[in-house]
Amino acid sequence: LAEQLSRSSLPVLRSHLLDGQARTAMLAADVVLLASGTATLEAMLVKRPMVVGYKVAPLTYRIVKTLGLLKVNRYALPNILANDDLAPELMQDDCTPERLCVALLDWFKHPEKVAALQPRYLAL
C-alpha cells in the first residue's frame, strides 16, 4: 500500500501504515471507516465514531434477499447492542465511495454528535 501511494498522483498526506495494528490505528483516528464485524466493537471500545460499510457478491445478496434469509435491521454490533443507529451503516448498493465520504464527513461537521456518542458507547 505504501508503495502504491508513493507512485500515485494523490497529494502527499502525512500518514503511517499500521499493518496488523487496528486498535492503534483506531486510537489515532478521529473517525473510523470499517467493514461490519468485530472491528466495530473495537472502534466502540476506543470510543471512536465510525462508518460501517459492507458488500457481498451480487448473486449472494439476491439469493439471501429472495429467500428472506436476512432477518436483522442492523449489522454493526454496537448498533445491534444499542438497538439504535449509533453508526451509519451503508450496505450493498448504498456502500459507494460517495456515500461513505458523506457519512464520514458528517462526523467532522457535527462534533456534538461525536460528544453525544461517547456516553452511549460507555453504557454498552
Image (cartoon, rainbow, N blue to C red):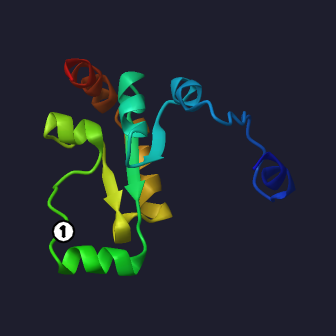
Q: Quadrant of residue 13?
A: top right
Residue beneath disc 1? 69
Whether residue 117 is visible here, answered yes or no, is yes
How far across and how far down the image is residue 116, in percent? Answer: 25, 25
**For residue 116, above or below residue 99:** above
Residue 60: which quarter of the image? Answer: bottom left
Name which residue lies at 25% across and 18% down: 122
Give above or below for 86 relative to 75. above
Residue for point 47% across, 38% down:
32
Task: Using residue 15 as the reference point, say whether residue 44 is left or right of it.
Answer: left
Tell me if I can see residue 86 in this picture.
Answer: no
Identify which residue, 117 or 11, lies in the foreground. 117
Spot occupied by residue 51 in the image (x, y as percentages of width and height): 39, 45
Local crowd size for mark 1, using a 10 Å CA cut-off: few (<14), some (14–19), many (≥20): few
- Horizontal side, residue 6 vs residue 58: left or right: right
Identified by mark 1, the residue type is Leu
Who's the residue at 63% across and 34% down the image?
Answer: 20
Give the quadrant of the C terminus: top left
Provide residue 73's location: percent of width, then percent of height: 16, 55
Kindly indicate the quadrant of the structure image that contains residue 79: top left
Q: How many numbered discs? A: 1
Please state if 2 lies on the left or on the right of 50 as rendered: right
123 relative to 103, above or below: above
Q: Residue at x 34, y 62 (%)?
A: 91
Q: Secondary structure at mark 1?
A: loop
Can you give x and y, in whole percent of width and height, for residue 37 in the image?
Answer: 38, 45
